[in-house]
Amino acid sequence: MSPACCRDLRPDRLAAQSLLILALTGLQSPSRGAAPEPLDPNRVEPTIVPAIAGSSDIGFLFGAMATLAQFEPGYDPYRWRGETVLVTAVKDGPEGAELTMQVYYLRFNFPDLIGGRLRLTPEVFFTRRINSGYYGLGNASQPGLAQAERTGPETGRVNQYISTSPMALLNGQINLGYGLSALVGGMLRASFIEPYAGSKLAVDAGATDEAGAPFIRGVDPDGQGHGRLAAGGQFDSRDHETAPQEGMFHSIGAYLSPPGPLGSEHWFGGVTADARFFVPLLRDHLVVALRVLGDMQFGEPPFYQLGQYGVFKDRSFTGSRGLRGPPQGRYHGLVKVLGNLELRSMFLSFMLFEQRWRLGATALADTGRVWAGYRIDPQLDGTGLGLKVGVGGGPRLQIGETVMIRVDVVYSPDSADGHDELPVGIYWDMGELF
């Protein structure tokens, strides 16, 4: 799960944040070295996690995340699983209370269809944010506006815009044996983009490049629609989907979004290669996890696509599902590289509500870089290595076999670009980053 609401909470704006972590008094915890209690192979695992937070940007955030998974013998790793998120935020605005952010989605996972040969994942998603981030194109983008771009005094909205996006996805995985799978997918998405007057997005939306073409595309309050067709392949040798301790997970894929009746006048596409490694240092207690990712887009993608990566589902390059530390939407470019290194430990296991719970912690280091285009532009991309970094860690709570809750506290020099007193980002999310 990756709700946009929980990817960019900052400490100086943090009012309250709550997570369903129950007191351990009276819980049945196995003694050191004892075998874990066996689970009923015919069971249903429900989980409800409240989301309560607050910040000066979004106000009071509240909602819930819930999952439901059914296990039966003969189905691997489960028969089906559903997941839903309902989160919104309320804050006083110029004309009274306003909804600063809304995130609603419903996803189902059917991993073992047609005798284990097919996996289907349908999903519907709706997001609306009044503080989506845009700082310009390239690795050398800076917060605020250059003197030549200013049309008046800067406001707190200079690097923000309003975005509304409903979407529907259907992805399929065809098992080929020996850990190999073929991947196919499709997406329908509408995007309504409203820049604030005098913002960086408003300036760039009215600019042109040296050839006279628009500097960026996709700024349309009336909305643009996109259809997507995607295909690829993957290799998966992990020992567990939710909390892997050893194995590998590699994937490569490409997508194409042609112009058509949905409203888009431009075509674009992308290619993403993702390699993940999991190495146990101490079985059941300490794991090294590494991900290396490259993403390239082509054609005439809208500007918001340049801040994301992925083929079968879009992920923000900065934030909870990418380079942690910098504000979400901090970097945009056609080409992106990303590296994530984690040292994971699960040190306490206990039974509660007929489910196995595990408590642990993770230390992490992220790095990445973007390029505005395929030709290096020192003005947009800077010179030298130019790697952005984030370091930190946080607790983990695994509930049953399919739910992992994580909190990451990450230091990055770029975190201060979110107008924080301290360069630290805090992320609360469901599911490991990778």
Image (spheres, helix red, strand yellow):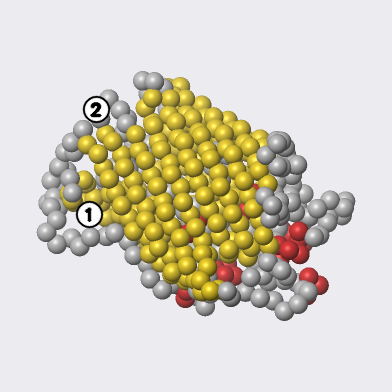
Q: Residue at x 18, y 60 (%)?
A: 24
Q: Earlier in the sequence, mark 1 or mark 2?
A: 2
Q: Position of residue 296 (x, y in %)?
A: 65, 43
Determine which residue is flagged by label 2. 73
Q: Position of residue 375 (x, y in %)?
A: 77, 49
> Disc 1 residue type?
Leu
Quadrant of the image occupied by residue 426: bottom left
Q: Position of residue 297 (x, y in %)?
A: 67, 43
Q: Residue at x 63, y 58 (%)?
A: 331
Q: Report the front residue among 207 and 363.
A: 207
Left or right of 121 on screen, residue 345: left
Above or below 165: residue 234: above
Above or below 352: residue 328: below
Secondary structure at numbered mark 1 = strand
> Disc 2 residue type?
Pro
Numbered mark located on residue 348 in the image: 1
Q: Position of residue 246 (x, y in %)?
A: 36, 40
Q: Report the front residue among 334 and 26.
A: 26
